[in-house]
Amino acid sequence: MNKVCTGVRIRVALTQTADGKPVTENDLRNDNRMKTQEKPPLRVLRSADLLAQAREVVIEHDGERYLLRCTSKGKLILTK
């Protein structure tokens, strides 16, 4: 099972092209693999929608259960 929660960015330093020539700055600028891809917008969930008038809700993640609780001061606490 794959567990992915955060993105990882890896940068590779290329020193030679496939034909053995040294890589230039121009090569790197023109290489589509080095261009940053746009990320989709984050989904926004309102706490009121998650809690639905309750003070606590159970969230299942990767086979584990977590408790999301709203305190009397309006703070959110997530515990396992």
Image (cartoon, rainbow, N blue to C red):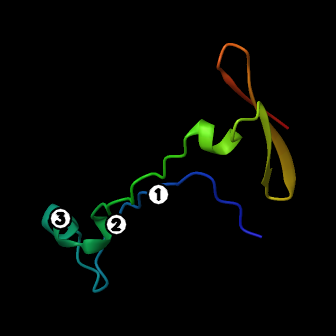
Compared to residue 57, the image places residue 19 above or below, namely: below
The answer for how far apart the CA atoms under marks 1 and 3 are is 17 Å
User: Disc count in the image?
Assistant: 3
Dividing the picture into quadrants, the one containing residue 46 is top right
Label 1–label 2 contact, CB within 8 A? no
Q: Position of residue 63 (x, y in %)?
A: 86, 58
Q: Position of residue 48 (x, y in %)?
A: 61, 37
Identify the residue position indicated by label 3 in the image: 29
Frontmost residue, 4 versus 53 = 53
Q: Amino acid type of disc 3?
A: Arg
Q: Amino acid type of disc 1?
A: Ile
Helix, strand, or loop for circle 3?
Answer: helix
Helix, strand, or loop for circle 2?
Answer: loop
Dot 3 alpha-carbon crowd within 10 angstroms: few under 14, some 14 to 19, many 20 or more: few
Identify the residue position indicated by label 2 in the image: 14
Q: Amino acid type of disc 2?
A: Leu
Q: Which quarter shows the N terminus?
A: bottom right
Q: Is residue 41 left or right of residue 28?
A: right
Q: Residue furthest left?
A: 26
Identify the residue position indicated by label 1 in the image: 10
Q: Position of residue 73 (x, y in %)?
A: 67, 13
Q: Which quarter shows the C terminus?
A: top right
Give the mark nearer the N terminus: 3 vs 2: 2
Image point (65%, 21%), residue name:
75
Q: Is residue 8 left or right of residue 65?
A: left
Give the mark nearer the N terminus: 1 vs 3: 1
